[in-house]
Amino acid sequence: MSIIKVALLGFGTVGEGVYRTIQSHQEELRAAIGKNVEVVAILIKNKEKKRAIDSEVLITTDFEDIIGLPDLDVVFEAIVEKEPSFTYLKRALLKGCHIITANKEMFSHHGKELIELAAEQQVSVGFEATVAGGVPIIQTLQQLLKINNVSAIQGILNGTSNFILTEMREKKQTFIEALKLAQQNGYAEADPGNDINGCDAYFKLMVLSGIAFGEQPELSCVKINGITDITIEQIELADKLGLRFKHIASIDRKEDRLHATVIPTLVSKAHPFYHVEGVENAVNVRTDLIGSITLQGPGAGMFPTASAMVEDLVQVLQSPATEVKSRKQKTVVKKDEQTHATSYWLVCKLKKRLSLNSISYSDQLSEEVYAIKASKDQLVKLYEQNADLITYPILGTFELESERKEATLLLTR
Ligand SMILES: NC(=O)c1ccc[n+]([C@@H]2O[C@H](COP(=O)([O-])OP(=O)(O)OC[C@H]3O[C@@H](n4cnc5c(N)ncnc54)[C@H](OP(=O)(O)O)[C@@H]3O)[C@@H](O)[C@H]2O)c1
């Protein structure tokens, strides 16, 4: 039986997970691809670290040792940052290897170029692990896109920020206490800044945008707010209203333009993300034919991420070459998605009460905190009058107390 020879770039959480999965799932791999898979070399940075790797595997800190290997079939990449990853993967493609990456930062910037180069070289690119770890969202989207037109994608794409928000609500911990716990449990990235400021979720959203819409919005047009402003008081207040804070990355296409945000959002019980807790990720996709579907599962971790990468291995070996699967989507704009349409918001630090006069519905929840129903235009006016205003959109079914009273009045008149 012939052998598929693979090299791993990186032997951290993900790289080691891939190595151990290839060892433990040889039988399944043989059944799927009819060949043995052998890890022949591993690139690392620090030669001093002790690692459980078979003695016949080449361990090196020099990429030239890897790229010089004869008969290399596949290169897995699980290192960090855009470079040197991008350069290494380009060289692997030029050598005729399939590549499989988990590196969302690099792939959100250079994915298109790598996919095009792979197509020229008649090899494939696997990147399922770049978004939502073990959740098979990339393959699902690629399957859906054959016929469906995607109108919008929403996701909880960062497990660390979701874990922090869950801990703050359930255990009444401060943001700093919850972040420390996330780091102790190994959930946070090496630089947790990217988890909590929204950059990590932004990278993943851009990967999804490239597949679903064939393009990415300019960074300057994407509103990215992290979770650091959210207080326990706000979380408790939301809880009383039946709402939970989630850090949601969204993208949709309206009037032929992409609109993307990565912002803290409140969801009601009716929303599919309400019960997505802890380090779980979830992605909701809306299309013209199926309506709405949600995938949920572990967004990170050694074996969920390795699973996505080893599934990619089977995929790239079974499909002859990468096709550029994204295509220009038809724009589907529903009436209630126009900017003048009203929706619900929690507004905090609203100092000038008079500025609410133009808004038909508002409930005061505590000092300077209101739940309101307003259009985006009305919200812009509130910002003009209240420099420190913080607003959170509310998704799912929600009704203000004042509206309920209004409805009761109408019924009893
Ligand atoms: N952790 C997850 O659950 C997860 C999930 C999905 C995607 N990802 C992505 O997967 C990638 C790897 O994540 P990780 O958690 O496995 O990171 P990690 O534990 O920090 O491991 C990184 C590995 O890359 C090696 N490395 C770093 N820079 C290198 C360089 N310039 N040359 C050679 N080797 C280098 C390190 O070598 P040493 O061991 O010698 O230090 C280490 O083995 C990242 O891009 C991350 O965003 C992670």
Image: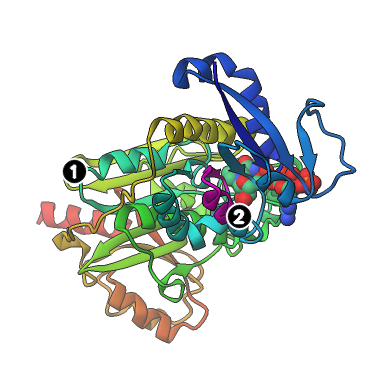
Q: Is residue 379 magenta?
A: no
Q: Amino acid at mark 2?
A: Ile
Q: Is residue 2 left or right of residue 325?
A: right
Apparent side of residue 84 relative to residue 92 in the rendered image (left or right) = right
Which quadrant does the N terminus fall into?
top right
Residue hosting label 1: 147
- Horizontal and vertical percent position of residue 259: 33, 66
Residue that appears at 12% across and 57% down: 410
313 vs 78: above or below:
above
Residue that sits furthest to the bottom in the current view: 385
Residue 229 relative to residue 322: left or right: right
Q: Quadrant of the C terminus?
A: bottom left
Identify which amino acid the numbered label 1 is placed on.
Ile
- Magenta stretch holds residue 100: yes
Q: Report which quarter residue 309 is drawn in.
A: top right
Q: Which region shows up in magenta?
A: 89-102
Residue 187 in view: no
User: Which type of secondary structure does the marked residue at label 2 adopt?
Assistant: helix
Q: From what the image shows, is residue 276 above or below residue 110?
A: above
Between residue 52 and residue 184, name the one nearer to us.
52
Q: How many marks?
A: 2
Q: Nearer the viewer, residue 293 or 21?
A: 21
| Position of residue 114 measured from the top left corner of the image (x, y, whole percent) | 47, 55
In the displayed structure, does residue 191 sit left or right of residue 392? right
Residue highlighted by disc 2: 232
Comparing labels 1 and 2, the label whose residue is closer to the camera: 1
Q: Residue at x 48, y 79 (%)?
A: 351
As helix, strand or loop, the secondary structure at mark 1 comes to loop
Tag of residue 347: none
